[in-house]
Image (cartoon, rainbow, N blue to C red):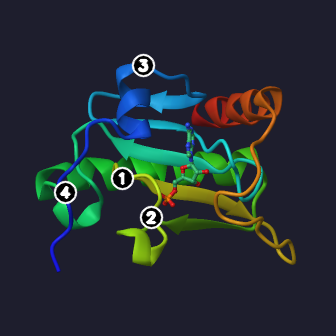
Amino acid sequence: MTSPAYDSNNIFAKILKGDIPSVRVYEDEHTVAFMDVMPQSPGHTLVVPKSPSRNLLDADPAALPHLITTVQKIAVAVQEAFDADGVYIAQFNEPAAGQTVFHLHFHIIPRHEGVALKPHSGKMEDGAILAENARKIVEALG
Ligand code: AMP
């Protein structure tokens, strides 16, 4: 099976264009990181490349080194900001694997021993809480 083509009307493409809001924690020439609006734990952040790809399967390999470097940078900041015992990093390809938004992204989710994750794409978080969690990550990024 081959995947459908990239659809530039997906919600993360709109976020990248600034057509819909996001709570951003980081941006550089090639990548953006913003808070997941339905976090599985406080501090759940998404890292996306600016270049269009549906997921990892159709991504330009040239974009990946910078992308994974940003994933590492944000994961380290999230661990510090939330005093996490560990950091869960997830990336889904196609609906059968759990993907719901079709612009490549990595989930960065702080984990604490004995604390269960909330469901994927569960409940919308309050905007003020997302903003406060973003502030902690930005502070950790220095
Ligand atoms: P995936 O299932 O890997 O495609 O994950 C998509 C993620 O995007 C889910 O965790 C959603 O909570 C999150 N999400 C959906 N819409 C938005 C949005 N407008 N801003 C931030 N995160 C979003």
**Residue 41 placed where, x, y %?**
75, 57
Looking at marks 2 and 4 on the same chain, the residue that comes earlier in the sequence is marked by 4
Q: What type is the residue that disc 2 sits on?
A: Gln
| Mark pair 2, 4: CA separation | 15 Å
The residue at the far right in this view is 114
Quarter-of-image position of residue 108: bottom right
Mark 3 or 4, nearer chain start: 3
Which of 98/28 is in front?
98
Q: Secondary structure at mark 3?
A: loop
**Residue topped by disc 2:** 99
Residue for badge 1? 102
Callout 1 amino acid: Phe
Q: What distance separates the C-alpha of mark 1 from that of mark 3?
A: 17 Å
| 51 lies above or below 57 | above
When asked about the image quadrant of residue 59, the answer is bottom left
User: How far apart in space, not on screen, are marks 2 and 3 (Cα)?
Assistant: 22 Å
Label 2 or label 3, whichever comes before in sequence order: 3
Amino acid identity at mark 3: Gly
Q: Where 64 falls versus 1 (above or below)?
A: above
Residue 78, relative to residue 139: is it above or below? below
Disc 1 residue: CB within 8 Å of ligand 1:
yes
Residue at 17 percent of width and 61 percent of height: 58
Is the residue indicated by label 4 positioned so its CB lies within 8 Å of ligand 1?
no
Q: Does the residue at mark 2 contact the one at mark 3 (Cβ under 8 Å)?
A: no
Mark 4 is on which residue type? Ala
Q: Label 4: few (<14), some or many (≥20) within 10 Å?
A: some
List x then y, in percent, for residue 114: 87, 78
Which image quadrant: the C terminus?
Answer: top right
Which residue is tagged 4?
Answer: 59
Q: Nearer the viewer, mark 1 or mark 4?
A: 1
**The residue tagged with tag 2: helix, strand or loop?**
loop
Measuring from the top left, give residue 84's x and y in whole percent: 75, 60
